Image (cartoon, grey):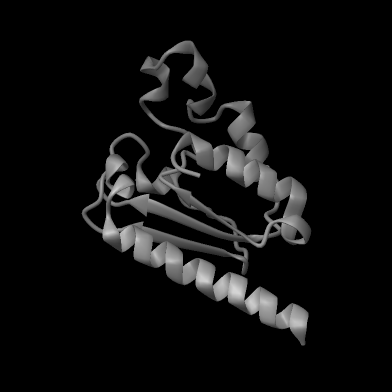
């Protein structure tokens, strides 16, 4: 999920786990909110830092392989707000150097890192099931 879509992807992964979802990738996801949400239209108010929806997501564990990528220069969702900070061996965080919020739409580095993550997690999962 990209940006706010990563909130939905994280919530679905938390509720369904590895039984149904092998891996999830979230790019520039405002896990801890966005400082600009207070200026956004009404529909983005849940992205204000500290909002109960975000706090609920941060309080729940993640039970599936998850990849959180943040942009080092992202001003809309600062990288500190877009990575999973609880210790979890299923989670990998990555801060993409010199990247802003919109870079994920076309940045080859992001595509390559996601592909490597999915190849590793899905291939590992499939080989474990076949053993």
Instruction: Using residue 49 as the reference point, say whether residue 79 is left or right of it.
Output: left
Q: Residue drawn at (56%, 39%), measured in percent from left and top?
A: 7
| Percent position of residue 100, x then y | 26, 44
Q: Quadrant of the C terminus?
A: bottom right
- The image quadrant that residue 24 belongs to is bottom right
Left or right: 92, with 13 as reference point: left
Residue at 46% from the left image edge and 38% from the top image edge: 30
Placement of 46 over or under 15, stated as above or below: above
Coordinates of residue 126 in the picture (x, y in percent): 68, 76
x and y, in percent, of residue 5 in the image = 51, 37
Q: How many circles with numbers are drawn on the protein?
A: 0
The residue nearer to you, when weighing 26 against 48, is 26
Q: Is residue 27 left or right of residue 21?
A: left
- Residue at x 70% of width, y 52% of height: 61
Q: Residue furthest bottom?
A: 131
What residue lies at 71% left-to-right and 58% top-to-bottom? 63
53 w.r.t. 82: above or below: above
Residue in the foreground of this view, choosing between 52 and 12:
12
Where in the figure is residue 99, as x and y percent of width and height?
A: 25, 51
Q: Tell whether 10 sits left or right of 107.
A: right
Whether 4 is drawn above or below 104: the answer is above
Q: Is residue 21 above or below residue 115?
A: above
């Amino acid at each position: 999920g990209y940006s706010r879509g990563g909130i939905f992807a994280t919530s679905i992964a938390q509720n369904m786990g590895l039984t149904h979802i092998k891996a999830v990738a979230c790019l520039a996801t405002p896990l801890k909110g966005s400082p600009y949400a207070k200026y956004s239209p009404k529909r983005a108010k849940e992205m204000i830092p500290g909002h109960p929806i975000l706090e609920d997501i941060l309080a729940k564990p993640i039970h599936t392989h998850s990849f959180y990528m943040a942009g080092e220069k992202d001003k809309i969702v600062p990288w500190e707000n877009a990575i999973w900070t609880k210790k979890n061996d299923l989670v990998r965080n990555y801060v993409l150097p010199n990247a802003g919020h919109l870079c994920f739409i076309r940045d080859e580095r992001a595509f390559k890192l996601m592909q490597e993550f999915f190849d590793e997690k899905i291939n590992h999962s499939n080989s474990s099931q076949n053993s």
